Amino acid sequence: MQAKINKVELRNLEIEDYKQLKKSMIESYPEMADSYWGSEDIERLLSIFPEGQLVILVDGIVVGSALSLIVDEKLVEKRHNYQQISGDYTFSTHNDNAEILYGIDVFIHPNYRGLRLGRRLYDARKELCEQLNLKAIVFAGRIPSYREHAKKMSPKTYIEKVRTKELYDPVLTFQLSNDFHVLRVIKNYLEGDEESKEFAVLLEWNNIYYDDSPKLINLKKNVIRLGLIQWQMRPLNNVEALFEQAEFFIDAVSGYGSDFALFPELFTAPLMADYNHLSEAEAIRELARHTDPIKKRFQEFAISYNINIITGSMPYVEGGNLYNVGFLCKRDGTYEMYTKIHITPNEVIHWGMKGGSEFKTFDTDCGKIGILICYDVEFPELSRLLADEGMNILFVPFLTDTQNGYTRVKHCSQARAIENECYVAIAGCVGNLPKVNNMDIQYAQSSVFTPSDFAFPSNGIKAEATPNTEMTLIVDVDLNLLKELHEHGSVKTLKDRRSDLYEIKKLNS
């Protein structure tokens, strides 16, 4: 990443974006700098199909876009070129009652490539296709590296070699990796495309949910995929080694389409080995020096892998006081901090930690969530207050050295899921960590717990990791089941409280 990014936004294109859109188009297609869409073209496109025009903004600047039409399947099946499919560039081929979402343009500014923003646009197109109940996405992709091989092989041979990864094409390779399949080669598709020798590849992505009720884009999801990381404590040479290991897991869970990645409490502790010659209190304050750089790198990972990351926890010094904090790094590039409220006797005695004074729910693109660090989940008042604020999923990063400690976290987390009618996801560290005082052994079994009613597992456990083994746990949770439970459950613990006799409330709120 070339510069610090504060926020990434995906939304529908507006005509006020045109100047920035034009600039990014020209930078993206320097070889066709005279062929960009004019403002009147974009205005016409927005008038006929506004929901199909998407933009990516980085810190308020348009850096990418995906433009599309809805066209008849018969038109796609015919031999066509770019001029014909776009209605001689008038978009007259658009038909609201047709079946195919046809991509007429997609680009990312060169300065912002490598952040997987193009994949985010493709994913948004797929979501739009599903929500509008369209049969498929079709578009003709360029093959810009074909010029280097045109004298030696046909387009068909070139495409096959790209498909089998014998050759790399910056456009086609990306499209194939995003679940598009080749329909056919089109000759003389885009006039002036010398890099592709005016060939294009007609590609398709099929909507397996075709016939579902249509919705609009950007509605909150009902089925949320959680990626829990059961982290192995191991010696690390430096912070870059920690980033390498963390990125491996983030890549893994995001590759399965996870909406959240959850790391454990104090998973950065291996970096404390360099300070083992100091007292425990001094060593952890040295570890706190890494916290801000770690937070910034995780913000980048959240953008690059299009996933919300809960960074477990790490030491943090503010006003001379030492706290145990973590960060919710959202995939739009923003972040929020949460603090451990209840500090264990061990943390006080060995490190001199203090408890935080603020807790709340967090708004995400998957609804409201809560985050409590380890010991905090053993105090039922906290999660009840978060449930009152609308929390659907409670995340609990934890660190326990013995099975006794883990049992407390596990059973309290299960209780929180039942009494607050929510999902609870817990993730911890495993293994041994020599040469780090007060952090030598770990025990964990990361899990996702549910309420206990007919729509959920009878034991209230959605999934569990293997105890004391480094691994990931990928779990889907359905928010619609919670809505049903709140209204029609066998018991309704949130509604049936005797608020005429007792209440729980935040002080000074």
Image: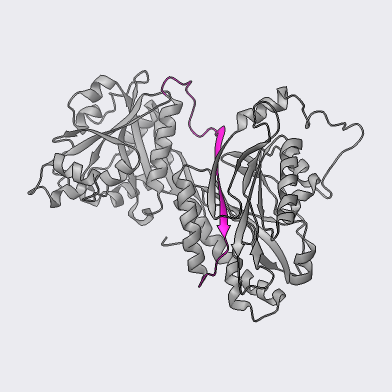
Locate residue 36: give its quadrant: top left
In this rendering, does residue 13 appear at all?
no
Percent of width and height locating residue 436 = 63, 72
Residue 227 as seen in the image, left or right of residue 276: left
Residue at x 21%, y 44% (from the top left corner): 143
Locate residue 65: give its quadrant: top left
Residue at x 43%, y 45% (from the top left corner): 56
Residue 130 as seen in the image, left or right of residue 320: left
Closer to us: 303 or 164: 164
Residue at x 38%, y 24% (from the top left corner): 134
Q: Magenta segment, principal secondary structure? A: loop
Q: Is residue 236 magenta?
A: yes
Closer to us: 399 or 32: 399
Residue span colored magenta: 210-238
Which quadrant would the N terminus be assigned to in this image?
bottom left
Relative to residue 486, is residue 403 depicted above or below?
A: below
Q: From this viewpoint, which residue is outermost toward the left?
A: 151
